[in-house]
Amino acid sequence: MRNLMFVLTALAVIGLAVWAYRENYRTQHAIKETERLQQEIGVARSRLAMLRAEWAYLNRPDRLRDLTELNFDRLQLLPLRPDQFGKVDQVSYPPLPKLDLSEIVDVSSQPGEGP
């Protein structure tokens, strides 16, 4: 009986060692994958910052104005003026739905009823 307990204990220790060994390598793999993803995110953020700066550079008002002047014959673009916009009271909103109040339901408690 005593030998059986020693064998079972040794098998349990070996099983736990194998489990810990596998978990250690899974954890190391997950850490490496996370570091790789963090590096990709950093590269993507830096590229996005560069693209935003380039977009802002290309959309400078003076550059766009010069482009419209160069291509006026083809595009016929004119500057925006305040009188080209409508007013809020000129916007037509859809009508509100009509509520049917023909059936009235009394939800108040009657005297003598209730708790």
Image (tube, helix red, strand yellow):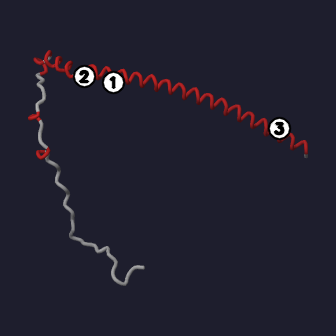
Provide the residue designation for mark 3.
10
Q: Which residue is mark 2?
A: 59
In which image quadrant can residue 100 be found? Answer: bottom left
Say left or right for 21 vs 43.
right
Amino acid beneath label 2: Asn
Mark 3, other Cα within 10 Å: few <14 / some 14–19 / many ≥20:
few
Judge whether 92 appears above or below 26 on screen: below
Q: Quick one: SS at disc 2?
A: loop
Location of mark 1 (residue): 52
Give the residue type that dot 3 points to: Ala
x and y percentages locating residue 82 in the rendered image: 11, 34
Residue 55 vs 113, above or below: the answer is: above
First of labels 2, 3 by sequence position: 3
Frontmost residue, 16 versus 84: 84
For marks 1 and 3 on the same chain, the one whose residue lies earlier in the sequence: 3
> How much space separates mark 1 and mark 3, taking CA atoms?
62 Å
* Residue beneath the point at 20% across and 22% down: 61
Q: Residue at x 63, y 31 (%)?
A: 26
C-alpha distance separating marks 2 and 3: 73 Å
Residue 80 in percent (x, y) is at 13, 29
Residue drawn at point x = 10 percent, y = 34 percent: 84
Q: Name the residue furthest right.
A: 2
Secondary structure under the numbered disc 1 in the rendered image: helix
Element type at mark 3:
helix
